[in-house]
Image (cartoon, rainbow, N blue to C red):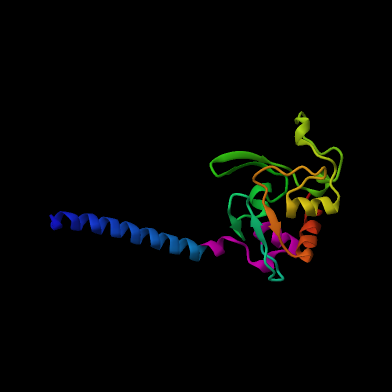
């Protein structure tokens, strides 16, 4: 009987070992998928693309699913490199992310053609944009939809991120 169990133990042990090896490779190689921090024109741009600060100050997010994050989720993950948003797949769901370019957020013509009225919002001020990023609140006080995380960062980093959003066109 023990002779028949041995091959199964080897298969299971080999599978566990292969899985751990794959995980180790991913952990080692993941940082190589991100641009070198010196390649960003500003701290705000680095925050947008990497959720890390050139100052070394912590930047974390609460994804409101019992998950805290740092670095894996970024503004660009959902809103795209150009800030225009679009369709994103997360947690086996598809959802639409909004255009977060500064000129789009701060004008009264903020909705898409034919967009339902409830998806529109009042024009944002700089303070409203910061509140949306850190508290997930729209200018009218309504909460932003899932999966918008609530970001925690220093005031200086938040100012830098806002300045970067102003450069997206």
**x, y percent for residue 78:** 65, 48
Say if the magenta span includes residue 33. Answer: yes
**x, y percent for residue 152:** 70, 60
Q: Nearer the viewer, residue 144 or 156?
A: 144
Residue drawn at point x = 78 percent, y = 31 percent: 117
Q: Is residue 53 left or right of residue 18?
A: right
Q: Is residue 111 left or right of residue 94?
A: right
Vertical side of 103 occupied by 113: above or below: above
Residue 57 in view here: yes
Tell me which corner region of the image, top left, top right, bottom left or bottom right, holds residue 51.
Answer: bottom right
Say if the magenta span includes residue 75. Answer: no
Q: Nearer the viewer, residue 125 or 163?
A: 125
**x, y percent for residue 17:** 34, 62
Vertical side of 147 occupied by 59: above or below: below
**x, y percent for residue 168:** 78, 51
Q: Quadrant of the N terminus?
A: bottom left
Residue 41 in view here: no
Q: Is residue 146 left or right of residue 122?
A: left
Q: Which residues are magenta?
A: 30-51
- Overall secondary structure of the magenta section: helix
Residue drawn at point x = 82 percent, y = 45 percent: 139
Q: How many marks?
A: 0
Residue drawn at point x = 56 percent, y = 64 percent: 31
Residue drawn at point x = 77 percent, y = 60 percent: 158
Name, please, the residue furthest toward the bottom.
55
């Amino acid at each position: 009987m023990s002779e028949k169990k041995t091959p199964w133990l080897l298969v299971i042990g080999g599978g566990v070992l292969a899985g751990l090896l794959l995980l180790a490779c991913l952990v080692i190689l993941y940082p190589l998928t991100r641009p070198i921090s010196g390649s960003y024109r500003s701290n705000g741009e680095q925050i947008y693309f990497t959720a890390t600060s050139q100052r070394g100050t912590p930047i974390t997010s609460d994804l409101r699913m019992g998950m805290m994050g740092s670095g894996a989720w970024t503004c660009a993950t959902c809103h795209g490199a150009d800030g225009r948003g679009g369709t994103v797949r997360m947690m086996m769901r598809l959802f639409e992310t909004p255009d977060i370019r500064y000129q789009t957020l701060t004008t009264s013509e903020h909705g898409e053609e034919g967009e339902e009225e409830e998806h529109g919002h009042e024009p944002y001020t700089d303070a409203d944009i910061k509140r949306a990023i850190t508290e997930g609140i729209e200018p009218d006080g309504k909460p932003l939809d899932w999966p918008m995380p609530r970001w925690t960062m220093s005031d200086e980093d938040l100012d830098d991120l806002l300045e970067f959003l102003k450069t997206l066109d």
